[in-house]
Structure formats: structure tokens, C-alpha cells
Amino acid sequence: MAVSLKGDINIRTAPSINQKALKINLNQNIYGSFSEIGAGQETARNFFRAGASAGTIAKAMSAYSKEFSDAIYGREDDGRYVTKARLKKMLLHEANLLEKRLNRNENPDRFYFSYANTVATIDFAKKFKGNGWIGIRFQLSPLEEYNEIILHIRFHENDAKHQQITLGKMGVNLIYGAFYHHDNPKDLLISLYDHIDKDKIEIDMINFSGPRFAYVDNRLMSLLLVKNGFTDAVMFGPDGFNLLPADELYKKNIMALRGSFSPVTKLAIDMLKKGEKLFKQEEDVDPDKIDLIFEMTLDNLSHQGDINERDFLDRVSLLSSLNSVVMVTNFREYYRLAEYFSRFSKERMGLIIGANHLIKLFDESYYEQLSGGILEAMGKLFNRKMRLYIYPYKDKETDKTITSDVIIFDQKMQDLFEYFKDDNRFKDIKDFDDTLLETYNREIISKIQKGESGWEPLLPDEIVIQIKNNNLFGYRKL
């Protein structure tokens, strides 16, 4: 039976930060080192202040000087310090030192950990809020291989001292969670925000690895980040591993297709290919820097407020099998997606949408929460190097093929629509496959679950094979 991601993270009672640090310190078996770069030694400080820290802390250091840091951990090929690669080097180096310098025979019951962070806090001009990597490498038995939890954070506070304090709290939560919530990674993830407001710090990527997390699917953990409002978007690569959006999208020509992809159809593939073809013809698009993304919103994934984990993994796995990058977001409105992309790239971007969604795009009722209404939304959507590529759809009632050329609004909205159309803010995809226009995902899913035929020609052959071989989306061979 599929497990739901339901749960209210606000109904949570947790030990204080000081109580967590003290409980770790009083555990005679937990022993490790702290290495923190870029924001003081705020995590270690919480353990020193809690008392009895001699029982936990083997070493606490901050190789703040780049020269010292390079001498200890080596120099990165790209010369950067706030990176995942740097963090992993720190964690491994410090764990190896524990094994090398401490005598296991004298402390046979101890299990070791190394905690590290490498971050950049807010700059003096307060234009760059800061970000960083946090991680822990730890054992849960003296003879066990090490486990790892690694996460990327983005600061939202406007004061470096406050950022340091928040980072220290999250560090304590991570160490405590590793030792006391490892058997329930979902609770562990939620506990990272114990005594921390979500608007202070964002976790936009997390990965669990090691023997205790062999059963954990990191894509589900990333989905939980979005579900609980810890971040706005997460990404997965074709190999199914999590990607950091800031790295993946940086200075790229981004093109995205939104949908439910339940399952991915030939129509969706045709939309992406034909949209990409037009996108490549733009003068300011570099074909070697295009990122094609299948994007799903939480609304796409939910049914009556619930998210079915098995269904989610089925969709993502099928998309990944097509060598695709997948993104899950909480952006119901397209302008919010455009704003998000613009955080990482100022290059030409594109969204592929069906003509039916173009009609909804110019529906004022979707923008009542904005003080500037639809004009504000359109300004946010098009006040960047964004262009929409419109794929036609077949109106089931009239049997007409709808493109932007035949869409009619009331006069006020028609004027706005024509303004953006004349300004070349969206283009119709002309060379579409009209045999695919009558593709409706709900009908496909219904046929699959009822064991009916006729859905197979609408899906790529490799997707049909996977659905049947793995009994996806409720398929059962009759």
C-alpha cells in the first residue's frame, strides 16, 4: 500500500537546542569532530555551552584561512570553497583522523561522527544573502560503515550574526537527528527545523547515504522538502539523483514543460521536442547551454490533498528513463516559475504550454491575491527574457483545433492579449502532430486501471513496456 506524505509539521514538540546538545554530550558512545568554515563555530558552540562537552567533542576547528583550508583538505579544481565536493572532503578527512588518532581498543563502544559546514553568509552590501553546505558522517555502531546526510541551505535573514545562530541550531538538529531519528528519515528531515522559522533558512537539496539509509529514496525526501514548505523547488537528473537547482540552472537557457506526466505521453514528448526546435532558433539561445525540464507542481501530484509516493516515483522514474531532468515545485502560477528561474539565469528562457493553458493564463481570477492583479502577474512573467511556446489543443465539444490565432477574450483582456502577442512574447508551434491532440491523461489512466486496451499507441513504446512489466499506475495483466 502506498504511503501518504500527510502530516502537520506544526504539531511538534521537540527538546530545546540546549537539551539536544546536552543529550548528545551525555551519551558516552557518541564522539566526534566539528569543522566549520565561513560562519564561526556556531554548532560546536552549542555543545560547549550545554555542558559535559568533553564526552562528545574530540576536536572543534575552523580552517577559515583559504591557505590553511587548502593545506588540510586540498585545493578544489574550480578553486571554490562553498561546494558539495569541499564538504565531502571535510567530512571524510575528519572521520579518517578520528579512526587514525583514537584507539578503538581503549573505547570499544564508541561510534564516531564528523560534522562539517562550509558556508558564505550575507555580504556587506546585503545583495547576496548567502548559502552553504552542511553535513554529517556518522556511525551507529563501532563496527558499522559510515552513513552520511548532506544538505544545501540558502540564508534568508538580513544579518550575518542571525544567520550564524540559525546555522548553529540547524547543525545541532542535524547531529541529534542523525543519532535519534535515523530510523525515520521523514521525522529527521522535519526535525531540522526544530526551533527555526522556515522563513529564516531554506533547504533546497538533501541526500541520505550509507547502510542505515539503503532503503531511502532521496527523491521522496526532496519531495518532502517542497511539501513542507522548506523550499520552492527540487530537481532530479536522468540518473534519478538529486540536483542542486542553483548549479544546474546557472546561466542556462532554460526551457520547461509543465504537466502531470501521469504517465508521460507521446503528446508531451512532441510538445517538448517541437518547443525545443523553436527555442533553438532564437538568436540569443546557445544550443549547448539548453536545460530541458519536465516540471510538476504539487497540485499535479496531489489527489484530495494527499500525495501518493508510489505514484510520484512511477512518474519520475518513467521521465528519468527518457533521459530527462525533472523538477517539482509549489508554483501554481507561471509567473512564479519565471521568477524562480530568473534567480539563477538572466539568459533567454521558454515555457511550453498548451493553448488551453494560455486561455487560463489570461483569466483575471487567478491573480486576485496580487495587489496589481493580472498586470502585475504579466509584468513578472514577461519582464524577463521569457517567451511562451504555444502547442494547440483539440476542443472536445467543438472538435476544433485551438491556437493563439483563434482565441477570443472580452475586449479588455483581448487588448492585453494582443499586446503581448504583437510584442512576440509567445509563439505558436506550427509543426505539431495532429494525431496526438486527442490525448487525455485521465482517460489513459482509466483504461490502464480497468485493464482496457487502446492506450498503448498514445505512449512511447519504452514507457508502455515499463508500465506493463512493473505494473505501474494500477496496471494488471488480465
Image (tube, rainbow, N blue to C red):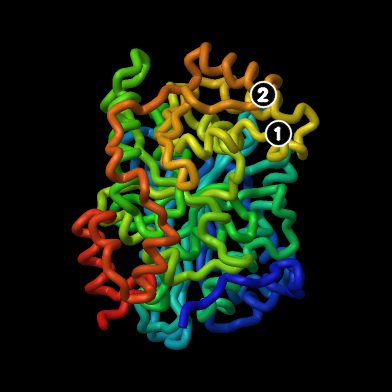
Spatial distance from mark 1 to mark 2, Cα to Cα? 9 Å
Relative placement, left or right, of 101 versus 176 is left
176 up-or-down from 444: above or below: below
* Number of numbered discs: 2
Look at the picture and state if 183 lies above or below 252: below
Image: 442 above or below 308 = above
Q: Nearer the viewer, residue 291 or 447?
A: 447
Relative to residue 301, is residue 25 drawn left or right?
A: right
At x 62%, y 27%, the residue is 409
Whole-percent x, y for residue 324 in the image: 31, 47
The vertical placement of 317 against 112, above or below, is above
Task: Identify which residue, 77 or 470, lies in the foreground.
Answer: 470
Q: Is residue 117 visible?
A: no
Q: Which residue is mark 1?
A: 364
Quarter-wise, where is residue 95 in the image? bottom left
Q: Is residue 370 visible?
A: yes
Task: Indicate which disc residue 430 carries.
Answer: none
Residue 338: percent from left, percent from top: 54, 32
Residue 254 figure quarter:
top left
Q: Position of residue 262 (x, y in %)?
A: 41, 59
Tag 2, which secondary structure? Answer: helix
Residue in view at x 30 percent, y 39 percent: 434
x, y percent for residue 451:
32, 76
Report which residue position mark 2 lands on: 413
Is 7 on the left or on the right of 217, as rendered?
Answer: right
